[in-house]
Image (tube, rainbow, N blue to C red):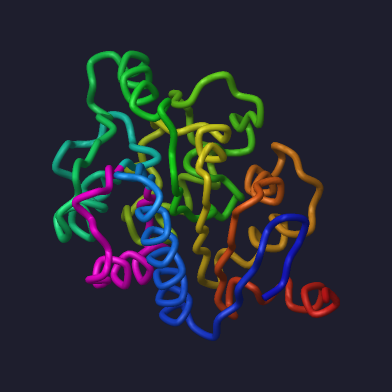
Amino acid sequence: MKQVDNLRIHIHETRQAMGAAAAAMAGDRIRLLLQEQEQLNIVFAAAPSQQEFLEALAADSGIEWERINAFHMDEYIGLDAAAPQGFGNFLRDRLFAKVPFRSVHYLNGNAPDPQAECERYAAMLKPGVDIVMMGIGENTHIAFNDPHVADFKDPKLVKVVDLDYACRQQQVNDGCFETFAQVPTHALTLTVPALLKGRYIFCMVPGPNKAAAVKHTLFDSISEKYPSTALRNHPEAVLFVDKDSAALSFDRLAQLS
């Protein structure tokens, strides 16, 4: 394990090993927290980068899912409700419908009043978030807080944002959409402060396309220019990477004790 500021970093040989290790650590944390409290609120990210982690977590038979309330961290605005690219649909197919959650709360990207939807979802998050399971985008966004809309002191917990070019192109790079024009231009997202409200953060970032983002996250100044750098200020955040996403950071990480 390495550490940069408060952020602990675990490097694994493959994304499968990374996902399994992250799920094992997250499962252990869930069990510990459930010894202290009756139920948990957990926020999940939806992205191909989370696939191995979600698969391993769903297979953990030692988790009392019926004591967990599930949330997700962002959703496209205006995408067909049945579209597989919808983040709620992604998580439903890979996790939410596979285990018996106490409750699952979906962000509605087709709500007639997006601002009202933000307020509705924020109200459910205000009591507190125990764990955030997340990733980092190619442009270092966390949730859909791209650099031009990220605000480390955002007064809101959920807001409407427009997506920058790099963010939309990533959706094509990930194979979620065939063309750039198909990618929605706006979304609902939990803000940076909302994500950092989580008592514990597990961040899974595999693959060669994320190597530059991991390097920025670890070694650039903490600022909204690279939103994921905010993780270095969190007291209980862990970053899981594979050898591909860590490729541009190995030399500097090797210098750390």
User: Foreground residue, 42 or 81?
Assistant: 42
Q: Is residue 10 above or below residue 98?
A: below
Is 61 magenta? The answer is: yes
**Furthest-front residue in this view:** 36
2 lies left or right of 91? right
157 lies left or right of 43? right
Res. 186 in view:
no
Q: Identify the residue shown where x is 41% and y is 73%.
A: 24
Q: Position of residue 10 (x, y in %)?
A: 60, 73
Q: Identify the residue shown where x is 17% and y is 59%.
A: 99
User: Foreground residue, 146 or 230?
Assistant: 230
Q: Identify the residue shown where x is 63% and y is 67%.
A: 211
User: Foreground residue, 208 or 94?
Assistant: 94
Q: Position of residue 38 (x, y in %)?
A: 30, 44
Is 172 magenta? The answer is: no
Q: Is residue 154 above or below residue 79?
A: above
- Residue 196, picture quadrant: top right
Q: Identify the residue shown where x is 61% and y is 50%.
A: 140
Magenta part of the chain: 44-70
158 lies left or right of 217? left
Quadrant of the rendering where the C terminus is positioned: bottom right
